Amino acid sequence: MESTNPNTPLQTWTRGYFANRTQLDECFGFEGEVKEHWKRLLHNIEQLDLQELKSRQQELLKLLKENGVTYNVYGDTDGLNRPWLLDTMPLLIPAAEWRITERGMKQRAYVLNKVLEDLYGERKLLKERIIPPELIYAHSGFLRPCDKIKLPGANQLILYAADLSRGPDGKVWVLKDRTQAPSGMGYALENRSALNRVVPELFRNHQTTKLGGFFNNMMQAFLDIAPQGKEQPRIVLLTPGPRNETYFEHAFLASYMGFTLAQGEDLVVRNGFVWIKTVEGLEKVDIILRRVDDNYCDPLELREDSHLGIPGLLEAIRKGNVSIANPLGSSILENTGLMAFMHNVFKYFLNEDPVFKMVATWWCGQPKEMGFVIDNIDKLVIKKIDRTTGSGTVIGSQLSKQQKDDLIRRMKAQPYLYVGQEEVGFSTSPVFTKGKLEPRYTVLRTFLVAAKGGYDIMPGGLTRCSPEKGSFLVSNQDGGIAKDTWVETSVKSNTPSLLHHSDLKRKAVLPSRAAENLFWVGRYAQRVVRTSRFIRIVLRNLGQSGSASNGQESEAQNALLHTITHITGTYPGFLEEDEAATVEDRLNDIHKLICDQNQHGSIVFTVNNLLKAMYAVRDRWSIDNWRIIDDMEDTKRKLAVLEPQGIRHVFTFLDQLNGSLLSFLEMNRQSMYRGEGWLMYRIGQLIEEISLELTQYRALLTFQYEEHIEFQILEALLVSNQNLSNYRSVYRTYFDIAPAIDLLFLNKQNPISILSQLEQLLKFVEQLPQKEKGAHDSEISNIVFECYSLVRLINVEALMAVDKELEFRLELDRVCEVLSSKISLLSVKLTAWYFSHSTYQYQGTKDNFKLEV
């Protein structure tokens, strides 16, 4: 046997790897020798020294974080942004072994497809007692309303995944079947892309099968189930939303495959068809790729408390007007108890044994098996047949006597809900961590898609390893580490990324919810930029004054502080008179307005809302934008934990935040597709910009002050609006209210004057789609045109006129108030016209629906 050379880097990295070893390893034999198909990869790794490998590992994790690759875990401290962990070491599978895997998985997919057809068809498996009826009817995945429903085409199970691992006998075992809405294929593709970019040296002299062909096959599988054989079907990916743990993958696949990403409330059933609500009206949907659990998909006939589904969906499916992958009811195949009967099922359909061994399983619904499980509970793993019931895996050997007694009592009360499985140790593979290689338990999730004549398999899959040495937990919820999966081949693959004949005549639709989120991305982004700039100016003035009650300076500062309250909407705020307030008190109040994420209107509160809107339309952003969003996240976290005594650091953080946001806005200006999404985003920006400017002008310019106080106020206003240099170069005079009003309201050469922005806004709203002829002209365009006309007719002298008794510019206040109310009305009308999700939905009937009892 060939052992590792003690003088090589590999020997250093594997020190302690073989201590107390009892399990098989994918890379090393029991004597420490490197397996033949791993030698080339380990040679390539050895060309990188330890420091370089550590650096590449950090670069890999940084790239994934910047690309927005996350796995959300409910209740986790990282919230919606738990980073995806990927090892620099891939899992290697030789071509000969993969051929066995491919044969075994295709065989299993074929049989499970037959089981699914039978359970919702003739149910011969139950009538002939191949599978006990109680095992099926007691499982929440058996959906009686789905009886006799069939998809077009030869296969009912469109997508299938299974978790595999190598057992103690050296052969691959099946651990779990995933048939409801298999996740992970998008992560597998991202793993390959990231590893290839960061550690290209590993791929040297390796021929690995590419993954693109699988997604081509997946697209064809969807086309094959199109209703009435429609050639260019509209495909929607149904997601539970941004809070779902695999939302990154939903958005990634939708973008990669060219599907429309939608939530349940984006879809509606009318006259037996499914429609998606878009800014142009209702558009018919032909195929739904669902990532919502099946019993949540139709609150009319399934779970009535579901907010994730589409009322009436089953009616549309029965009528053959929409196809759904995987079909509703397919989660019955994830029933753990089926493992106990699969050998007989294979014999029934194929008259042959399964290629892959399965974990020995005893269903407790049978008295003999129940007795065996109770007698051997110390040696078994106890599970419920339904993974949605909230009870996890229980390892009998780890239970106390009281816990065992309680478990046995529950099992005896409902024996048909439990199974016992043998406790088996599976193989490990090397993970690079803490500067060395460690053996970690490893599970490979393989993916298959229906094809004519059977199934096609992804050449690779999603490999997950346990986060700690000795731990059997490999799931992402438990902190599992992912690996790229290489299937070796002797043939060079030239498969392009994605083959699909797109319909060039069909315009991509913009769901109403996506339009609304883009609109609010524009608004929140502009709000953060303008508000943080102004607060920054006020902070600097406060820091320079040294006193909160210093005559002339105090009056100017009070005006600026009052304006902060107006633009943030944090009433009463600084409008409350407090003569005893010190500079320190003011700084503490401003600290809350910046850093308190529970304070409505604060900078961090608004950034949180901005990030939520960004994540809701994450399929719309480029990779470069995701790097910027990641920087914003980091800055927001720093602001959120900044203590009041560290307020001096806030300038740096606000500069970083503004820099990131301005980069984001510029990136969108350069690269965002000029469609309806762009219109909504830009309209949101302009509405927010105009609203904030009018609020500022009304707060600062309507009162008459002494000349030197007015000077300070105008300077602060022009600096915060980035107009100071424009004012000086155009008017060449000291600060005065008349030229300031001209610059801020009427100067068309100033891109952020009210007139210029209304002109842009008018151009954008005139491009909005019209659902009914001329209807939105009177509702939306006219509002903007009225504002535009009002500003064009402004008389500067009239605006400057001061009521001497009130020392107040009444006309300026009136104009600002009228414009503000109209812009606010515009936002309301846009929401009602384009973003409404409360459209009345016809609930439908169960035509020709008969349930076999």
Image (spheres, rainbow, N blue to C red):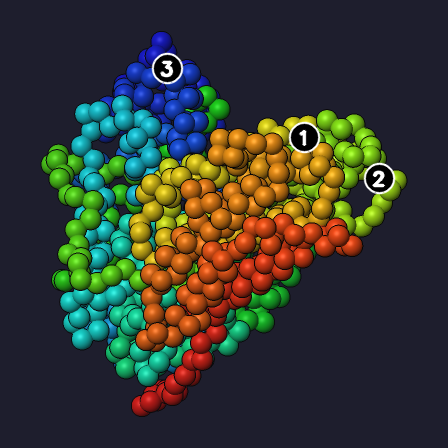
Residue 75 image label = none
Task: Report if the CB atoms under discs 1 and 2 are less than 8 Å apart.
Answer: no
Residue drawn at the location 78% of the way across and 34% of the way down: 552
Label 3 vs label 1, nearer the camera: 1
Q: In screen coordinates, is 815 left or right of 273?
A: right
Q: Nearer the viewer, residue 664 or 548?
A: 548
Could you tell me residue 703's position as x and y percent?
A: 71, 48
Q: Residue at x 43, y 22 (%)?
A: 54
Up the image or down, 418 lies above or below 612; here it is below
Labels 3 and 1: the sequence-earlier one: 3
The reply to whether callout 3 and callout 2 are in contact (CB within 8 Å) is: no
Q: Is the residue 615 above or below the residue 350 in the image?
A: above
Q: Residues within 10 Å of mark 1 (few under 14, many from 20)?
A: few
How far, Cα to Cα, is label 1 from label 2?
A: 18 Å
In the image, 58: left or right of 319? right
Tell me the mark number nearer the camera, choosing from 3 and 2: 2
Q: Which residue is mark 2?
A: 581
In the picture, the quarter occupied by the C terminus is bottom left
Compute the Cα span from label 3 to label 2. 61 Å
Residue 99 location (% of width, % of height) = 18, 45
| Residue projecting furthest to the top | 7
Q: How many marks?
A: 3
Which label number is shown at residue 540? 1
x and y percentages locating residue 444 in the rendered image: 34, 44
Tell me the amino acid under the disc marked 1: Arg
Task: Give the secondary structure at mark 2.
Answer: loop
* Label placed on residue 49: 3
Q: Is residue 421 visible?
A: no
- The residue lying toward the viewer, choosing from 242 and 458, is 242
